[in-house]
Image (cartoon, grey):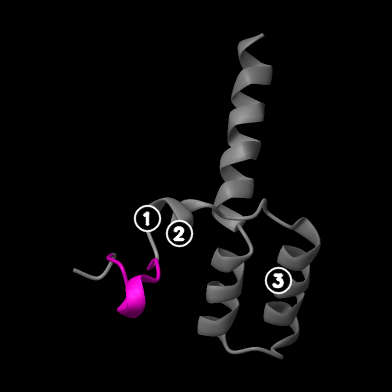
Amino acid sequence: MPWSVGPGGSPGRNLAQMDQRPAPDPAKLLADWMEWETGDTPPGRVMSNLKTHGLRDLLEELVASTSSSSDA
């Protein structure tokens, strides 16, 4: 069981802690995108960075705000 108490009774990782992500950082996302455009970073690393820096969350927020604006 990977999410259990570790050796010596120390707490291991749990799913609640893993789900707590920082808010998307548009500045980091733009920097990641610019690395893609200039070819400074391999595509797989760029995709990983975009995911890590919250691109999905940012896009979901934009879609939600656009949807709520068009509903009014």
Residues at discs 1 and 2 in contact (Cβ within 8 Å): yes
Residue 8 within the magenta-colored segment of the rendering? yes
Q: Compared to 25, does 47 lie above or below? A: below
Q: Where is residue 20 in the image (x, y as percent from the top left)?
A: 53, 52
Q: Position of residue 27 (x, y in %)?
A: 81, 62
User: Could you give the CA–CA distance between mark 3 and mark 2, rounded to whole angstroms?
Assistant: 25 Å
Single out the mark in the foreground, 3 or 2.
2
Single out the mark in the foreground, 3 or 1.
1
Q: Compared to 44, does 21 lie above or below? A: above
SS class, disc 2: helix
Q: Quadrant of the N terminus?
A: bottom left
Q: Where is residue 35 in the image (x, y as percent from the top left)?
A: 73, 81
- Provide the residue designation for mark 1: 15
**Main secondary structure type of the part rendered in magenta:** loop
Q: Which residue is drawn at 58% across and 48% down?
A: 57
Q: Residue at x 66, y 28 (%)?
A: 65
Residue 10 within the magenta-colored segment of the rendering? yes
Task: Please give left or right for residue 58 compared with residue 8 in the image.
Answer: right
Q: Residue at x 40, y 71 (%)?
A: 10
Residues at discs 3 and 1 in contact (Cβ within 8 Å): no
- Provide the residue designation for mark 2: 18
- Judging depth in this view, the residue of 2 and 37 nearest the camera is 2
> In this picture, which residue range is highlighted in magenta?
4-12
Q: Which residue is drawn at 59% across and 30% down?
A: 64
Location of residue 70 (image quadrant): top right
Which numbered marker is on residue 33? 3
